[in-house]
Amino acid sequence: MFLIDKPFVSDFLIKTLKENSFKVIATQAAKALINDDSLCWVSEKEAISTLKEHPKTPLYSNSENALSWIEQHLGESKLASQIKILKDKVQFRELTKRLFPNFYFKKIKLEDIHQLAEEELSFPFVIKPAIGFFSIGVHIIKNWNDWEAAKNELHPKKLKSIFPKNVLNISHFIIEEFIEGEEYAIDYYYDNDGKVILLNVLHHLFSSGTDTSDRVYSTSKEIIETHQTDIEHFLNEVGKELNLKNFPAHAEVRIDKNGKVHPIEINPLRFGGWCTTADLMGITLGFNLYKCFSEHQKPNWNQTFRGKENQKFSIIVLDNNSGIPTSEIIDFDYSKLADDFENPILIRKLDINQYPVFGFIFTETSPNSEQELTDILTSDLKKYLSY
C-alpha cells in the first residue's frame, strides 16, 4: 500500500501507481494531490484494518508528513514505535550505541544552545534538529567562529518550515561528533525476513568541508558495487535491533578512509524525499524502485546499467542559495540551465514561492563531462535568475 501526502508527489510515482494498480490509501491529502479516480484507492478504514490485522503488509510513503497519519491511526503499533525511534536522532544514536560505543552525542534544548560555554564544546562537531528534514538547521562546526555564526542562525524565526512537527521539530537539537569521510545516501528495504535489499547508493557531493547543502547526489554502477557489501552489513545490524521487515527506508551514512560505515540517520517508510532518489533510476535507467519494493524484487545491477556502465546519474537540488530574497525573484531560466548539462533527462520545475526549491534536475553524465556537476555544486544560481 502507498500512503501519499504533501508537499509533493511526482508524475512518475503517480504513473507507477496507476500502471501497476498499487493500492493507495484514500486520505484527504492524497486525494488533493492526485485527482484520478482510476487509481486503486482503498478507504482509510480498510487500510487501517489491513495494517492492524496484517502488520507485515508492505507500506510506502512518499513524504514524512504522512507519518502523523500512522501515529493517529496506528499509534500503538510496532510500526509506529519503529518510526519514532528512527525519526528521533537521539533515540537513533542510542539504538546504534552497541555498534559505535565511543561515539559522542548530546541532546540540548534550542533555548540552551546560546548558553553553552566554549569549554563545554569539543570541535569539530555537528548540530542539527533532533527531529529534522532537508538539512534545515544543520551546521558543521569546526571552530569557535563557526559556532558564533551558527548560533545566529539557530533561532525560531530563522528556522520556519512548511513541514509538521513530527517531520521537523526545532525544540530540541543534537550535538554529535563530526564524522570524517565521504557521505552517501541509500535507498533500500528490509524484506519479509528482515534482510536488506539495496536499491541505490548515491554519493552526496559537497562544495567544502562545512557545506551541509543537498545540491548534488550521484549514482553509478561503480558507486553501488564498491560500497554495497559494507553498507548492507551495517544496515542489517540496524535492522536486527528494531526487527524491521517489509520496511522501506532512506539512509544517510559517511564512509571513512578505512571503509567503515558510520550512520548519520535512517528515514523511515520512504526513499529520498520529494520523489527524488526513488525516481532517478526509473527516469534515467528504467529501474523502478517503487515497483521493486512493492513486488519484493531484488535488483540486478548488470542488467540495470547495461550499456551505461561508465555513466553517472545525478539529482541536482535547486535550492535558493543566491542570497536574493525569494520575494525579489521574478523568474528562473530553466532552458539556460539545461544548456549547461550534457544530458538533462528531466527538469522538474517547482514554484520557489510555494516550495523551498526551484526544482530538480535528473541528469546523465559521461566521464569526460563531470565538470558540469562540480560547476552546479558551487553555483549560486544567479546566472539563471531574473530579479
Image (cartoon, rainbow, N blue to C red):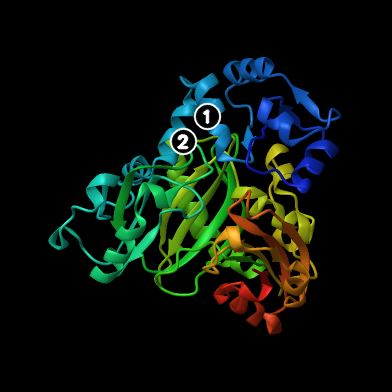
Crowdedness near tag 2: few (<14), some (14–19) or many (≥20) residues, C-alpha within 10 Å: some
Question: Toward the viewer: 253 or 126?
Answer: 126
Describe residue 239's horizontal placement relative to residue 37 as left or right: left
Q: Secondary structure at mark 2?
A: loop
Quadrant of res 376: bottom right
The x, y position of residue 311, in whole percent, is: 71, 73
The CA distance from mark 1 to mark 2 is: 7 Å
Q: Amino acid at mark 1?
A: Ser
- Taking the spot 31% from the left edge, 49% from the top edge, the residue there is 174
- Taking the spot 60% from the left edge, 15% from the top edge, the residue there is 53
Residue labelled with disc 2: 166
Dot label at residue 58: none
Question: Toward the viewer: 198 or 329?
Answer: 329
Question: Toward the viewer: 339 or 287?
Answer: 339
Q: Disc 1 or 2, which lies upstream in sequence? A: 1
Residue labelled with disc 1: 68
Up the image or down, 56 lies above or below 279; here it is above
Describe residue 136's horizontal placement relative to residue 247 as left or right: left
Quadrant of res 121: bottom left
Q: Amino acid at mark 2?
A: Asn
Up the image or down, 146 lies above or below 250; here it is below
- Taking the spot 63% from the left edge, 63% from the top edge, the residue there is 329
- Taking the spot 60% from the left edge, 47% from the top edge, the residue there is 271
Q: Are marks 1 and 2 in contact (CB under 8 Å)?
A: yes
